[in-house]
Structures are given as structure tokens and as C-alpha cells.
Amino acid sequence: MGAVVTDKWIHRYEPAPDAGRRLVCFPHAGGAAPYFVPVARAMAGDTDVLAVQYPGRQERRQEPCLGSIDELARAAVNALEPWLDRPVTLFGHSMGAMVAFEAARLLERDGRAPQGLVVSGRRAPTCVRPARDLVHLRDDEGLMAEIRRMDGTDDRILADEELLRMILPVIRSDYRAVEGYRYRPGPLLSCPVLALIGDTDPQVTREEAQSWAEHTTGRFDITVFPGGHFYLNSQGEAVIRAIAQHMSAADSPRAC
């Protein structure tokens, strides 16, 4: 089934207009909305899954990428305005976790706190590692080396020079946004937070993920899966179950 594009920011692959809750998915650096098609299919019926499509990719490839996590979060929240008529959980992987977190803070500030937040493959925003080098400043070969290290991109894409020329500027821009992000202290979230990580992910340790607990007054849980940064490519069913359980627990008033 093709996406039902409600506006240029929001894709729905399995519309569930009668569902009592929504899950909003935020892609990783270089990623796009279709990455979450399996989530939409698995949750079809009881959850209306929305996937955010950032500018600069696929049908939005002619649009300039946004330069910061804050810009992405603000634009996404604006696009979500029509979808806040029922409980919403935000789910982001890697860069998407940062965008989802800042979007959750904006919603909380406006008195429309999400029902839950799921952050995957990303250390808490207060866990800052010393910068050895900035990926977005590397040449194309250096950027491709980082992509290969993360092991989340199909080798056929890496071997297609024409396709690479199309996606490298997007990936570079996304890394610029990630590497330029600076956490600004503010009020804590009130919703429950679930952190998901792979046990061999070079980007986040269990301790760094555990620090997400410091950013909410609600319940915090962490689940560790086998795998690296893109553990969810091989652990999809288990990840979807974990998210569904988090959402069901959040339905209870005792969850926060």
C-alpha cells in the first residue's frame, strides 16, 4: 500500500482513523518516512502510525534540508497540529530520537504533552562525548566510511554512485544538525520514557541511555536488544512489541 500523504511532513501507510491512539515516528540521519512501513503494518488497527518526512529526501528532495534539530522539531510539531486529537506517543531512532525529544518538550510547553516518548539508539542529551572529529566536515569518502561503520545502509546504495550523489548532501546536513545540537536545560517531561538500544552500538552505552531517566518525572524503562546501531533492522518484531507495551502501559493513569 502506498503512503497516504496528509501533508508534505506526514505520511500514513496504514491509516487507522478509528484507533484510539497515535504513534509518530521520526527517522534517523539520512532516513526517510518509509523506514517505518513495517511499524505501520504491524500496528495497523489499534494504532494510527504517522511517519515524519523531513525535507531534502525522496519526494521532498528539491527542498533544502533544515539545519538544526530545533528547526526539525518545530516544523514537525506544527505539522502534527491536526493529529493531536487523541493520545500521541513519539518514537525516534538516532537523530530521530533527538527530534522526538525536542518535539515532546515543545508539546509539553504548550500544554499538550505526549502520552509517551520512545528514544532509540541515542544517548541522553546531557551525555556529551568529547568530539574527536566532526563527521559532517569529512570529505565524501570519510562520510561514507561513517555510514558503513553504522551498518544501516544497503550495500547496493553505497555502490550506486548516482544515488550516492543524491543522498550524501542529505546525510551530511543531518550530521551537521546532530553535531550542532546543544541541550538547553528546561522543565522535565511528564510522560513515561522508554529507551531502546543495541548491546554493541558504538553510539550509545547502557549508562548513557539510562540517563534519559533524568529528563522525565514519569516512568522510565530501558530495553537492550542484540545488535549494533541499527539493531532494529534485525529485531523489528521485538522492537514493535516493546513500543506497543510502552503505549499500553501509558494508557494507565499510573504510568506517569
Image: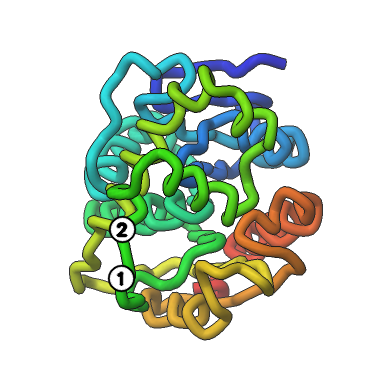
Q: Are marks 2 and 1 in contact (CB under 8 Å)?
A: yes
Which residue is at a point 78% across and 56% down the rendered structure image? 235
Spot occupied by residue 49 in the image (x, y as percentages of width and height)? 60, 36
Q: How dense is the environment of label 2, judged by Cα within 10 Å: few (below 14), some, or many (20 and up)?
A: few
Spot occupied by residue 222 in the image (x, y as percentages of width and height)? 61, 75
The answer to whether 98 is drawn above or below residue 26 in the figure is below
Kindly tell me whether residue 48 is visible in this rendering.
no
Kindly indicate the quadrant of the structure image that contains residue 229: bottom right
Read off the residue under disc 1: 131
Kindly tell me whether residue 20 is visible in this rendering.
yes
The answer to whether 250 is drawn above or below residue 152 in the figure is below
Q: Is residue 175 left or right of residue 247?
A: left
Q: How dense is the environment of label 1, judged by Cα within 10 Å: few (below 14), some, or many (20 and up)?
A: few
Q: Is residue 249 left or right of residue 204?
A: right
Of residue 18 and residue 196, the one placed in the foreground of this image is: 196
Q: Amino acid at mark 1?
A: Ala
Q: Amino acid at mark 2?
A: Leu
Read off the residue under disc 2: 134
Q: CA distance from mark 2 to mark 1?
A: 7 Å
Kindly indicate the quadrant of the structure image that contains residue 34: top right
Which residue is at a point 33% across and 70% down the rendered structure image? 132
Q: Indicate the secondary structure of the residue bearing disc 1.
A: loop
Kindly indicate the quadrant of the structure image that contains residue 75: top left
Spot occupied by residue 192 in the image (x, y as percentages of width and height)? 50, 69
Which residue is at a point 64% across and 24% down the rendered structure image? 13
